[in-house]
Amino acid sequence: MIFIFYHYYKIEEEHTRENLFLEMKNYSLFFDNDRFDIDIVQRDKKSKFYELYFDKDSLFILIPFPTDQDDLLKVFYPKKKYKALLYTIKLSILWQFLFLSFIAVLISLLFSFYVLSPLRQSLQLLEVFIKDIIHDLNTPLTSILINLKMMDAKNEEVESITNSTKTISMLHHNLDAYLKEIAFEKEKFHLKKIIDEQVAFFAPMYNYLNWDVDIQDTVIKSDKNALARVIYNLLSNACKYNTSKGFIKIKIDKNIISISNSSYGIKNPSRIFERFYKESDRGLGIGLHIVEKLCTQLDIEKELEIKNHIVTIYLYLDKVTIK
């Protein structure tokens, strides 16, 4: 559209010059138009009659005198007025361009809404379907966990089932947190207990990793379940994408939680907290996105650091720590 209107402006500019030229020729015959002025100039060998010329002050044509071979009649039009004419043309074309652009954008938006409407409806149905599944999973998961507590916890098979059920339960909570806004309930609790529970859950499953846990007990005021999901997702990610003889290091120092793990490297560090982004076929790609979402809602700042294939995520608890 810009090219079309620029071309249109050039055509209008040329038409304006042609009209001025024709009007000057008519004026030279009848002298009946007060838009133009006249002057007498000396003939030049290069001068051509009835052609449009430009100088720094005007547009003009040269007309010969029938009885005088040395002087010429100069009919001219001030360049200031000529520029004013071009400015009026530009303004008119600009308004046309803006109006047509608005119409084009409006038509594009309406067409986009029309085309994307089936996709939007499908996504809404899918979201409702997932919410229904999550709601239906809640009851049997709770029942399984309650019954497992009544069984022999020292039995390896029971312990394995318990761990698997807890994994499914945490995935259930992740999907629930992803699909809807949950009202947080702030309470005072010991951070060490939350971390110890998560380490106790993951360490047996990933016993080939070297676990280094150095945490000081810190009392914070926040949503206990939400922060537990943050720690769970960070540890889950650190375990899944670790090396075969790697390590996980958890440390609390000056109200900062750092979770480090060995890694084969991250291709796009700036994207790891994006929704559905993943660098392998494992997982759903929502774990770290939920960390991003929960940290924002809990008023916890986070930072990612990658040095020599060691990935570290820092959680800054200054705003939630009780001093």
Image (cartoon, grey):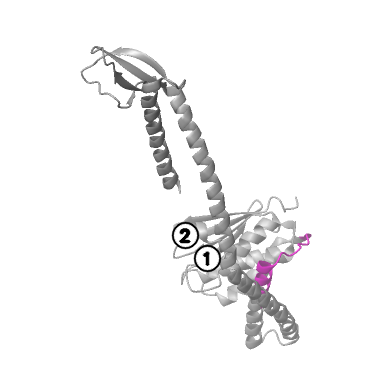
Percent coordinates x, y for residue 313 in the rendering: 56, 58
Q: Is mark 1 on a helix, strand or loop?
A: loop
Q: Residues within 10 Å of mark 2 (few under 14, many from 20)?
A: few
Q: Is residue 52 left or right of residue 263?
A: left
Q: Which mark, residue 268?
A: 2
Q: Nearer the viewer, residue 321 or 210?
A: 321
Q: In which quarter of the image is residue 141?
A: bottom right
Gap in angstroms between the C-alphas marked 1 and 2: 10 Å
Tell me if residue 193 can be seen: no
Q: Which mark, residue 323?
A: none
Find the residue positioned furthest to the left. 45
Q: Which of marks 1 and 2 is in front?
A: 1
Give the mark nearest the N terminus, 1 or 2: 2
Q: Is residue 192 left or right of residue 259?
A: right
Residue stretch rendered in magenta on the structure: 169-188
Q: Is residue 2 left or right of residue 144?
A: left
Q: Residue type at mark 2?
A: Asn
Q: Which of 144 and 197 is in front in this view?
A: 144
Q: Is residue 99 above or below residue 62?
A: below
Q: Quadrant of residue 147?
A: bottom right
* Residue wearing tag 1: 277
Task: Assess whether mark 2 and mark 1 are in contact (beta carbons under 8 angstroms).
Answer: yes
Identified at 53% across, 61% down, the residue is: 272
Q: Is residue 301 above or below residue 177?
A: above
Q: Does the magenta stretch include residue 200?
A: no
Percent coordinates x, y for residue 303 in the rendering: 57, 54
Q: How crowded is mark 1: few (under 14 residues within 10 Å), some or many (20 or more)?
A: some
Q: Residue type at mark 1?
A: Tyr
Tell me if residue 267 can be seen: yes
Q: Is mark 2 on a helix, strand or loop?
A: loop
